[in-house]
Amino acid sequence: MNIVLELVKVLFAFVLVMGIVPLLIWLERKISAWIQGRVGPNRVGPFGLLQPLADVVKLLFKEDIVPTNADKGMYFFAPLLAMVAPVILFAFIPFGPDIVLADYTFKLQVCDFGVSILFFMAVLSTAVFAVAFGGWASNNKYSLLGGIRAASQLVSYELILSGSFLYILLKWNTLSFRELIEKQAAYGWTIVSDFPFSLLFFILFFIAALAENKRAPFDLPEAEPELVGGYHTEYSSMKFAMFFMGEYIAITVMCFCMSVMFLGGYHFPGVVDVSGNFLNALLGLAVILAKVFILIFIYMWIRWTLPRFRYDILMRLSWHYLLPLTVILILVKALI
Amino acid sequence: MPGIKTQEILVNMGPQHPSTHGVLRLVIKTDGELVTEVTPIVGYLHRCAEKIGENVTYDQWIPYTDRMDYIAAMGNNLGISLAVEKLLGMEAPPRAQVIRVLVCELNRVASHLIAFGTFGLDVGAFTPFLYAWREREMILNLFEMLCGARMTFNYIRIGGISFDIDQKFIDKTKEFIEWFEPRIKEYNDLLTYNRIFVERTAKIGIISPERAISYGLTGPNLRASGVNFDVRKDFPYCGYEKYQFNIPLGRDVPEIGAVTGDCWNRYYVRIEEMIESIKIIKQTLENIPAGEYYDAPKKIKPKAGEVYTRIENARGIVGFYIISDGSEKPVRAKVRAPSFINLSILPEIGKNVLVADLIAILGSIDIVLGEIDR
């Protein structure tokens, strides 16, 4: 019985994250259109909601091209990794309060163990391999440049992410996402309970998350005016779609992570408690989704407003400003 | 580590590449992200426009000039018309002269809007491009109202213009100006003073005034280097001397770190030129003389001789050199295309910059391939 419930939960989490992706693609188009004074997709389905579906169908029917002299194994492996890694990340995210069924506590989280933040970081850093492999294996100079850019960019900004995780550890003394939310429910959300630090770390984390997800203004690995498509120049058909979906899944997971770390996750004062009935779990899910979508909206807003950084400016920003700031803040926090 | 060596890679940018603005091909040698050498290769859009000009009558050549600088085609129309008029020893009627200035300046605004938008695109800002497109669309609608064409007009003819303007056109133009003027501030807020944008463009691809002159740069690229030369002011045609307008020049802007002749100045000179063009358009609208708008001999058959005229188009000086032997067709026709000459400086300033800078420099030079290859 339990194993069936667990499987249902895994399936639900998977469907949730895969269901968010087309919605995000649609949202991105609508928001960009809104910012740019256009209409956006409005033909396929109500409000163009089925547009992503049409895109997938189109991509499925495209020819799948493998460049000559491409490193076949790596070429196939890269998009797989790009998509699977963020999906795995989602396993650690609690997306609702517990549901208590008679004698069984049903956790709305695929897997919860004591050091889930540590594991989250570990899986997160595999993202760089997908891009670097993709860039290398395509046997294309643009891809190679994109891959190199991506590798150095992701490595530099991951340090800032790790710094923020370290701060969370210092502040709440836990490495479990679930406990994190419970503590925030009890003592107030991170962002308000530890005001100057938490806000600074939130901003640092947000910037680093933008860079980690290769979103504008940090989308150098795929800067189309310079590198055509960057690391995915040679990819077509579903392999390209996997890179594309992987990016959106990664964004979703990052926003989930941010809302859990800084914004109290599924907790909202007065609306959601941790009592464990079914309605409450649904409310919790709605709350965390609302937070995630607000963050995603900011992601998109930034993307369609700002120009792109240049490679050296990006590196300078990370190593000269953000990273020292993170280290100093952690030291100060640790001393206090 | 022994046995591992680094080498420069040769990247072929184009002819199909998102940022080469057409079918330009750049062969670049890169050392990692650093460009050590860049060679532009042109000719993918060659359509023998000059040779065709020698095989058709003067009037028939005008539509072909449209297709050279297709972004600012009015200027090309005007150039050829003025050249042939000079050869014929005649002048267009005053009404036509004023309308010519009006449409040329409108076209200059449209062209600079594209330059502004695509430059934003080159440095990774997508949204300003669509804003620019929105405004340009209004100008194109005006042109459509005027002559039925939106890009290749064939509007300015030898001896005048092909269609007269009416009150509706004037009203619509005023409406456009009213809408457009506040937009400049919007562009500045969105892009010009954006911190990332300034970082990307200030002190990049600096062209000194001497170098700009020695490479024969014209138009906004020359003026961004601080050289005050504009054919409209220095050698006025079509009555440009009657209008009040300034020539925007590139300058050092210490607050944001821009220096004369860098990409930021080349970009900003265009924004300022749009403001000046709007000033000229306002003045022309106030005062359009009545009378004939087209007055040309039945048969255009100039005496034997040669002529060179130049006009200030959006990208610089468009020159038409025509040799006539007294027949209906020119013996030799040569066009001085500003984009072609402006592009010649790219190997010089595109050296030892980052790949992203090279794209910014190319975008700031603002070329049109139709004109380069002709």
Image: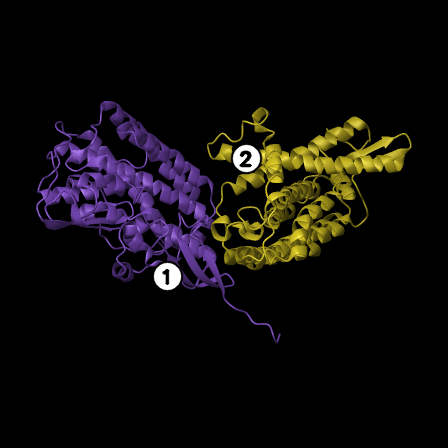
Chain colours: A yellow, B purple
The residue that mark 2 highlights is A29
- Residue nearer the viewer, A98 or B113: B113
Q: Which mark is residue B27?
A: none
Q: Answer left or right for A79 relative to B22.
A: right
> Farthest right residue?
A103
Residue nearest the viewer, comparing B298 with B273: B298
Across and down, in percent, residue B147 comes to 26, 30
Q: Quadrant of residue B291?
A: top left
What chain letter is assigned to the residue under label 1?
B
Please provide percent x and percent y for residue B304.
9, 48
Q: Nearer the viewer, mark 2 or mark 1?
A: 1
Q: Amino acid at mark 1?
A: Pro
- Measure how far apart labels 2 and 1 are at the Cα level: 38 Å
The quarter of the picture where the C terminus of chain A appears is bottom right
Quick check: can you spot residue A12?
Answer: yes
Q: Mark 2: give few (<14), some (14-19) or many (20+) Cα within 10 Å.
A: many
**Percent position of residue B279, x then y:** 25, 37
The subunit carrying tag 2 is A
Q: Residue at x 40, y 34 (%)?
A: B134
Indicate left or right for B332 with B277 as reference: left
Task: Choose between A260 and A198: the one closer to the eye.
Answer: A260
Q: Secondary structure at mark 2?
A: helix
Mark 1 Cα-neighbour bin, 10 Å: few <14, some 14–19, many ≥20:
some
Give the amino acid type for the residue marked by disc 2 in the picture: Arg
Q: Residue furthest bottom?
A: B2
Quadrant of the rendered image containing residue A46: top right
Task: Look at 46% across and 57% down and name the residue there.
Answer: B12
In the image: residue A44, left or right of residue B297: right
The answer to which of A261 and A92 lies nearer the viewer is A92
Q: Are marks 2 and 1 on the same chain?
A: no
B164 to the left or right of A61? left
Residue B347: give its label: 1
